[in-house]
Image (cartoon, rainbow, N blue to C red):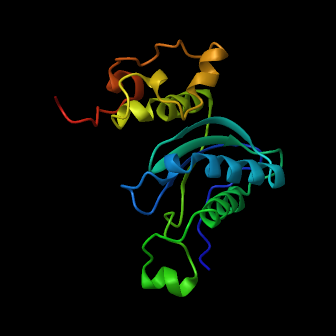
Amino acid sequence: MPNYRRYRVPGTCYFFTVNLLERKQTTLLTHIDLLRRAIRLTKMQWPFSVDAWVILPDHMHWMWTLPHGDNDVSIRWRLIKSRFSRQLPRREYRSQVRTDRGERGIWQRRFWEHVIRDEADYAAHMHYIHINPLKHGYVTRVRDWPHSSFHHWVQRGVYPENWAGDGDLEIITGERESRPAQ
C-alpha cells in the first residue's frame, strides 16, 4: 500500500475536500442521513471537533481540529467513507481494478487536506467552505443552502445572515465567479 506524504501536525486544525468518484452524482445529498451517521460513529471512535462544513451533491469540505497529540486524519476519512459506502445499495459502476480490489465505486480514493497555519488561513478556509454552494451556483444566497455550518456561525454572531447574499465572489474569496454568465 502506498505511503502518501502528508504533513501531519498533532492536535491541529485541517481543511479537507472529499469527492465522490462520479462528480455528477447527488449521492451525498440523497443519502445525507447515512453520511451524518457515518460521521457520528467515526467521531465516537476517533474524536475530532468540527469547525466548519458544507455538503454538496458530489463533494464536501470540512475543517476539523484533532485532539492534542493526534494527527491521524486518514483513519477517520477511511472509516467515514467505508461506513457510508456499506450502507448504500451496490448499484454503482465499478472498474475492473476496483472490482479486483473489492472496492466500491463511491468515492475518489484519496482526499485533499491542508493544515491551517494561522487565524487568517482559518478565516479564509471558513469563508471558502461557506461560499461554496454559491460558487457552484446551487443558491444565490449562502443562507439558502441548508447543508452547511454557516447557520451555526450566524447564530454565534460570526457571520451576518446576509453574508455573501448577492456578493461578489472575487471580493469574498479571491476567486472569480464560476457560474455561467447570464
Query: Where does the image place residue 179, in percent across and percent down from the top left?
Result: 26, 35
Q: Up-down: is 113 above or below 155?
A: below
Farthest-out residue, bottom:
100
Q: Pick whichever, 139 or 47, lies toward us.
A: 139
Q: Where is residue 47 drawn, in percent x and y?
A: 80, 48
Q: Reply above or below: 80 against 182.
A: below
| Residue at the far left in the pictured view | 182
Residue 163's x, y, as percent?
Answer: 46, 16
Residue 83 appears in which quarter of the rendering? bottom right
Left or right side of 146 for 41 = right
Residue, x 62% and y 27% (percent of image)?
119
x and y, in percent, of residue 160 in the image: 53, 12
What residue is drawn where x is 39% and y is 56%?
23
Q: Who is closer to the viewer here, 118 or 94?
A: 94
Task: Residue at 45%, 76% (x, y): give it.
Answer: 94
> Which one is in front, 155 or 118?
155
76 versus 138 height, above or below: below
Q: Is residue 49 left or right of residue 167?
A: right
Q: Is residue 77 left or right of residue 147?
A: right
